[in-house]
Image (cartoon, rainbow, N blue to C red):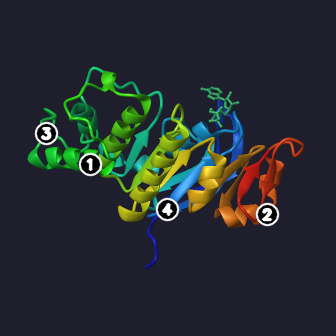
Amino acid sequence: MERKMILHTENLSIGYQNSAIINNINIAVNQSELIGVIGINGAGKSTLLKTISQMETAISGKVFLNRKPIESYDLKSRARQMGLVYANQNINKTLSIAEVIALGRHPYTNWIGKLTREDQKQIVNAARDVGITKPLNTKCSNLSDGQFQKVMIARVIAQQTPLIILDEPTTHLDMYHKIQTFKLLQNISEQKNKAVIFATHEINLSLQLCDKIILIHEGSTHFGSPKKLASTGILNQLFPSNMIKFDENQLLFKL
Ligand SMILES: Nc1ncnc2c1ncn2[C@@H]1O[C@H](COP(=O)(O)OP(=O)(O)OP(=O)(O)O)[C@@H](O)[C@H]1O
């Protein structure tokens, strides 16, 4: 079955105050794909995610959601298509787990924001999907970083969007919880047919798990499957070779 294209860009240039950080970005993201955005500090990963989610304005070029220009969506209809998990989202931690997940239902609730039975069902399902074991009335201030990250992912699952964008979803997590979060994102894309795009510094994990990689290097993007990118030799250029080497066969960076 051909996968539906959810998001694509045409000659997108991104940056700030009309000064471009990356030019000519042409990417296409399909349903059921897990896409990692990698690159060194300051490469432009967050800027790319912010621009495709309309938090920053593009310098030039276009972003399309479901083949329609993204500006043609109003806020509510866009929120039904695209869910975001950003580290600096100001979530009040005195809210309970259920209340934070309920925030994901905002594109569906009426003007009083009253939750319907369907909303309640989606909240419980989303908590189950990410493996939250604490009672849903637990305050988020009582959760560890890893547990809170699961709540944030449950919130975006409850939003029921075909596209999920996450900026560094595994920062502050230990190796086990990093892998658990990556596996969770992989499950969401495979089993719920969602397109999942996330920025990460976990290059080795993303090369092993992602369907496609957006590599940002010196103002350009390189886009394709991990194998395809490895075959171009671009991964060898990412870090000084006297310190870190890329093993093309194992798709791994090694000391
Ligand atoms: N609001 C802003 N105004 C001007 N320049 C910015 C702004 N935000 C980021 N930049 C610059 O844009 C460049 C890319 O930053 P960005 O945060 O997108 O990189 P990143 O790849 O996500 O980095 P990191 O891995 O360190 O989080 C950097 O040079 C940064 O200083």
- With respect to residue 4, does 175 lie above or below? above
Judge: label 3 CB < 8 Å from ligand 1. no
Could you tell me residue 152's position as x and y percent? 37, 37
Q: Which residue is mark 4?
A: 33
Could you tell me residue 130's position as x and y percent? 34, 47
Q: Earlier in the sequence, mark 2 or mark 1?
A: 1
Could you tell me residue 82's position as x and y percent? 39, 48
**Residue 232 bears which disc, if any?**
2
Please identify the quarter of the rendering in which residue 14 is found. top right
Q: Earlier in the sequence, mark 1 or mark 4?
A: 4
Hey, what amino acid is under mark 4?
A: Glu
Q: Earlier in the sequence, mark 4 or mark 2?
A: 4
Q: Is residue 53 visible?
A: no
Cα–Cα span, label 1 and label 4:
22 Å
The residue sitting at 38% across, 45% down in the picture is: 83
Furthest toward the right, the residue is 242
Q: Earlier in the sequence, mark 2 or mark 3?
A: 3
Cα–Cα span, label 2 and label 3:
50 Å
Cα–Cα span, label 2 and label 1:
41 Å
Can you tell which of label 2 and label 1 is closer to the viewer? 1
Hey, what amino acid is under mark 1?
A: Arg
Q: Earlier in the sequence, mark 3 or mark 1?
A: 3
Mark 4 crowdedness (10 Å alpha carbons): few <14, some 14-19, many ≥20:
many
Q: Nearer the viewer, residue 247 or 22?
A: 247
Query: Do labels 3 and 1 touch, CB within 8 Å?
Result: no
Q: Nearer the viewer, residue 244 or 235?
A: 244
Which element carries disc 4, helix, strand or loop? loop
Q: Which residue is mark 1?
A: 128
Q: In the image, ligand 1 is in what quadrant?
A: top right
Cα–Cα span, label 4 and label 2:
21 Å
Which element carries disc 3, helix, strand or loop? loop
Furthest toward the bottom, the residue is 1
